[in-house]
Image (cartoon, rainbow, N blue to C red):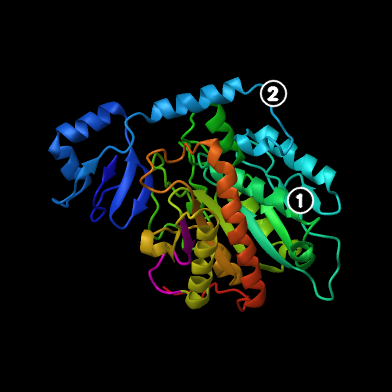
Amino acid sequence: MRFSKKRQLNCQGLDIWDTQPTHVDFRVSPVQARAIRDDHRILSRISKDSSSSIQVLESDIGALIDGESHRLAKRGLEARDNSTWFQEYHDLATITAWFQLLANSSPSLVTFVPSIGQSVEGRDIFAVRITSDVVPATPKKQIFLEGLIHAREWISGAVVQYLANQLVEGYATNTTLLDAVEFVIVPVVNPDGYSFTWTDDRLWRKNRATEGGVDLNRNFDDHWDTGGSSDNTGDETYHGPSAASEPETQALQNYFLSSVNSNVIGAIDFHSYSQLILRPFGYTGADSPDEAAHATLGSRMAADILSVNDVQYASEKSNSLYVTSGTTTDWWYTQRRIYSYAVELRPNPSDGQGFILPPDQILATGEEILKAVTGFVGYALANPLPGGSLVGNEPA
């Protein structure tokens, strides 16, 4: 369902799918939908704005999920060759095996890191490092990429897989990128939650901590619990009992700050959906010290995406969309003063399918994001930010 206004909206307890300046989209059960339509008192409790209106974008999300489940059940044996891999989404075990195969097939370019830490349920969080064996005069700069911090955002994982594959396959015809930089990739930040979307609840977002899970992208140790997250354990944006309380968050923070990743100059956290390129900050409306450079690069990325499939992405500050705190991108930027973005992938907000993006859009999404990431790397190399830590010196 969509509210046409977001001003004074009480989002507590709602499963928010998308937030824009003009509206908020959220999921409700059929019983809740009928109650909201029929009882204006419920609408008034959710929004105090008398001009708010309501619209049903998709009347049966369950049917979309059932259709996806039926398609996945019929596909038979998992295909791990690249001719069919990007025609479908894949479960955690198959994704892990695919990355291991990528490393085994291209050992001079790909290093598979079996574990950078473990999840709440004891699953390994693996990483992949992609670069050539060319040793330049100075240490290579690094680009950090991650996906599936939110479990239900399957396209974010598929795009990370596509990027990894194209970096490796592309080296045969163009050595420039991997001779210059190393890509450090965490393909599945939230393995427990992602596994749960395959076995129990396709629309699960958080990790699998007790009492309903924690939103890992509100749990990072940067202005934690200062807005845009919830104290309620049942809410989708529950930030956890304390900053970096979750083992997944701890693993990501420790790995990012480890000595093997000391030359990172840019990082992207892939999400879905809404077709947005979001830059720091989320916790405050104040500009970051590098707002101009971030804005320029974000606009260039949007232009690169548009040039591939004529798909429009918007570039803006995270806080301009809505307040968030304890996020990966704010934490990256504050810790290292690097280019730091959250990219919200397809579909657009009015599509109606939300997180259930058909697999026939994987390749097209990957192609446009590859163009953006290639431009991102080139710009970051040519226009590096100062680096260093902003901790204690960031805007209030």
Indicate yes or no whether the magenta region holds residue 130. no
Residue 157 appears in the rendering: no
Image vertical order of residue 331 relative to residue 72, above or below:
below
Q: Is residue 26 left or right of residue 38?
A: right
Indicate yes or no whether the magenta region holds residue 277. yes
Disc 2 crowd rating (10 Å Cα; few below 14, some 14-19, many 20+) is: few
Residue 112 x, y percent position in the rendering: 78, 47
Residue at 66%, 46% (x, y): give it. 161
Residue at 39%, 31% (x, y): give it. 61
Residue 341 x, y percent position in the rendering: 53, 62
Disc 2, SS: loop
Q: Which residue has dot 1 on it?
A: 169
What range of the chain is rendered magenta? Answer: 276-287
Q: Which residue has dot 2 on it?
A: 77
Residue 209 x, y percent position in the rendering: 53, 38
Q: CA distance from mark 1 to mark 2?
A: 24 Å
Residue at 58%, 55% (x, y): give it. 369
Residue 225 appears in the rendering: yes
Residue 309 x, y percent position in the rendering: 52, 53
